[in-house]
Image (cartoon, rainbow, N blue to C red):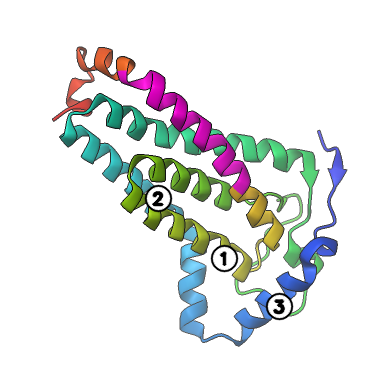
Amino acid sequence: MTLLSLNGASIDGGLYHWFIVQAQNAPHWFDDLVSFYASYGLGLFALMMLWCWWQARKARSAGSMALALAVPVAVVLAYVANDIVKSIFDEPRPCQVITSPATIQPCPGIGDWAFPSNHSAIAAAAAAAILMLDRRLGAIAVLAALVMGFSRIWVGAHYPHDVLVGFVVGAVVAVPLMLAAKRFGPPLVVRLESGFLRPLLTA
């Protein structure tokens, strides 16, 4: 149920406008690259999650496997939490409010609310969770999440504050879940390894 109709343009509409002007003036190849990542870049995080699972399976570590299995759970829960916030604050997409210049991606329709950014929440949750499992890969995931947030503004889908709050929601959901998985997950993994899931949990 909607509690507040959010006027995003009054928060950072000027900064959003600066971004879309830069996008209009940027080389086409750069806009195409950013647009592709804005649409499909979440697949990179899926690949990272698969890599984490594969490495944990090879390591034969119940602790590592518990964390690896918790990463996608954190992502799903972050998406759900972010969608709940989105249902409370009805904020029109910035490209529906600030119509000039045109954005490099088609503007989503009315009713497809902007605040907070689902893409940013998912990317932040994945990055925070992976960072707690593997610092080196996590650093790459954090960079990828930042680029995702930038790309969503660049293509005109979100105000900067949509992205920042999405980042916060993703991290706030992921970090406690990963801490809980680190503490309580290994015994569960050990029990599952004695069943039919063993080939998925250990090499």
Q: Image height check: is 121 above or below 11?
A: above
Alpha-carbon span between mark 1 and mark 3: 13 Å
Residue 155 appears in view: no
The mark nearer the N terminus, 1 or 2, is: 2
| Circle 3 SS class | helix
The structure residue drawn at horizontal position 47% and vertical position 44%, both measured from the top left corner, is 128
Mark 2 nearby-residue class (10 Å; few <14, some 14–19, many ≥20): many
Q: Position of residue 190 (x, y in %)?
A: 25, 16
Q: Image height check: is 39 above or below 72?
A: below
Q: Is residue 3 left or right of residue 162?
A: right
User: What amino acid is found at the position of numbered circle 2 in the picture?
Assistant: Phe
Alpha-carbon span between mark 2 and mark 3: 29 Å
Q: Tell me which segment is drawn in magenta.
A: 168-186
Quadrant in which the C terminus is drawn: top left
The structure residue drawn at horizontal position 46% and vertical position 82%, both measured from the top left corner, is 29
User: What amino acid is found at the position of numbered circle 3 in the picture?
Assistant: Trp
User: What amino acid is found at the position of numbered circle 1 in the picture?
Assistant: Phe
The structure residue drawn at horizontal position 54% and vertical position 33%, both measured from the top left corner, is 77
Query: Which residue is denoted by mark 2 in the rendering?
Result: 45
Query: Which residue is denoted by mark 3 in the rendering?
Result: 18
Q: Image height check: is 18 above or below 78?
A: below
| Circle 2 SS class | helix
Query: Which residue is denoted by mark 1 in the rendering?
Result: 150
Q: Position of residue 63 (x, y in %)?
A: 29, 27
The mark nearer the N terminus, 1 or 3, is: 3
Q: Position of residue 155 (x, y in %)?
A: 60, 69
Alpha-carbon span between mark 1 and mark 2: 16 Å
Total numbered labels: 3
Mark 3 nearby-residue class (10 Å; few <14, some 14–19, many ≥20): few
Q: Is residue 173 magenta?
A: yes
Quadrant in which the N terminus is drawn: top right
